[in-house]
Amino acid sequence: MPTPASMLACVAGQAQFLQTVASYKKTLLILAVGLSLVPQSLAFQLKKPVRTRVETSTQSSTSAPLPTGIPEGKIEPEEPKPIRELSKTALRSLFDPLEFGESEQKGRLESTKDLPRALELIRMPAHNFELKSVGDLIVSLRKKITDSPRNAALRIRLGTFLYLAGDSEGAGQEVRRAIGFDPGNYVAHAMMARILSEVGDIQASELEFKQAIKIAPDQAILHVMQAECMQARGDMSEAINEYRRAIGIQPSAEALSGLADCLLQANDTIGAVKAGRQAVSLDPSSGKAHVALTKALLKYGEKETPLRTARQATLLSPTSADSHAALGRSLFSNGDVKGAVDEFRQAVSLDPLNAQAHNDLGYALYSKGDMLSAINEFRLALRINPRLGEARNNLEVAIYGLASGKRRQ
């Protein structure tokens, strides 16, 4: 006859046994789940990085190739173009055809007639400017502001050159003062909007753009600038609308080129080609228009025509990183990887902060088998623009390829 004590010990033993079995089942389940994940990770196949600009859409154009009428044949690479910078005189001339600041031009700096050119100046690539000349103009303007501290035109000019020098905060302060002295100056509001957009204050930027457009509704450049800011932060649908508004006010190669880029990123390849062709037709001397058309034609599947339009872009804008990058992509699509690498290097040397150029260079280097250099370029691209999805994809694939190569060795 078992005693109560022995019965309690038996029950306790059974409970411990059941608990142990449950623990083993849980462990086996975890191991099974873990093992089921292993084949998936090992099944990741190394592929050549896919060069796509937009990750939000997976549609692709399958239309028939555009007629080009260009005979087949390889075009020899051109010699790299020299880097040219805008001198002090050229910087001044962008504000006024007559050099301001000289004794015979007394009072021209205070004029607001040529201030809209400031909007062109701040949107030009920074590497186009000679820093010493910019510094000289900043010193000159500060002296004049000492004599006329409430002059909005002087403040806008100073803000422009501070912006070109890389001092966005200082530029914003001067432009803000200009708005305080002249609230109806649309140039000041537009400049403030761009600066605010670049520092990430989207709401304040939109308010400034709205005020600028309210003051000068017939200025297409305001819609172009707003579209550029929207495009930079990835708001393609709104950017497309703004570019179309600008074109409705005054068609320009600049607005059509921007529209082509946005349509391309939105996967409307046909629309991008059409806008690019219109841009080139409207202004055959526009390097930006030729770049936009080149990118659209490449996405469409053309090879020879983009090569010609890209070469024309580098002839029209030899100091444009985008022109050389477009030529690099065209050469790559035609099988000239070495020429593509040279053009991408030229683009990076012209504009070291161009994330897309670094990504394209990395892609070409990866294709040559130089994985370490490719990885460095992809990393640089992501440091400059963490939102560049294709660089992130390319970096992951290149690192996997490097690891796979080491394992095989």
Image (cartoon, rainbow, N blue to C red):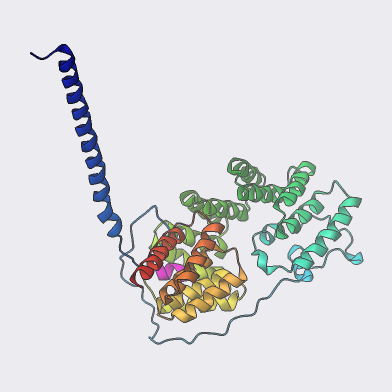
- Percent x, y of residue 47: 34, 66
- Percent x, y of residue 405: 37, 70
Residue name at image x 50 percent, y 76 percent: 341
Q: Quadrant of residue 398?
A: bottom left
Q: Quadrant of residue 211?
A: top right
User: Considering depth in this image, is 202 or 190 the residue closer to the camera?
Assistant: 202
> Dividing the image into 4 quarters, which one contains the N terminus?
top left
User: Considering depth in this image, is 186 or 388 the residue closer to the camera?
Assistant: 388
Left or right side of 285 for 266: left
Q: Quadrant of residue 52?
A: bottom left
Residue name at image x 51 percent, y 61 percent: 379
Q: Is residue 86 visible?
A: yes
Left or right side of 193 for 90: right
Residue name at image x 73 percent, y 65 percent: 94
SS assignment for the magenta stretch, majority? helix
- Percent x, y of residue 248: 53, 55
The stretch in magenta equals 293-299
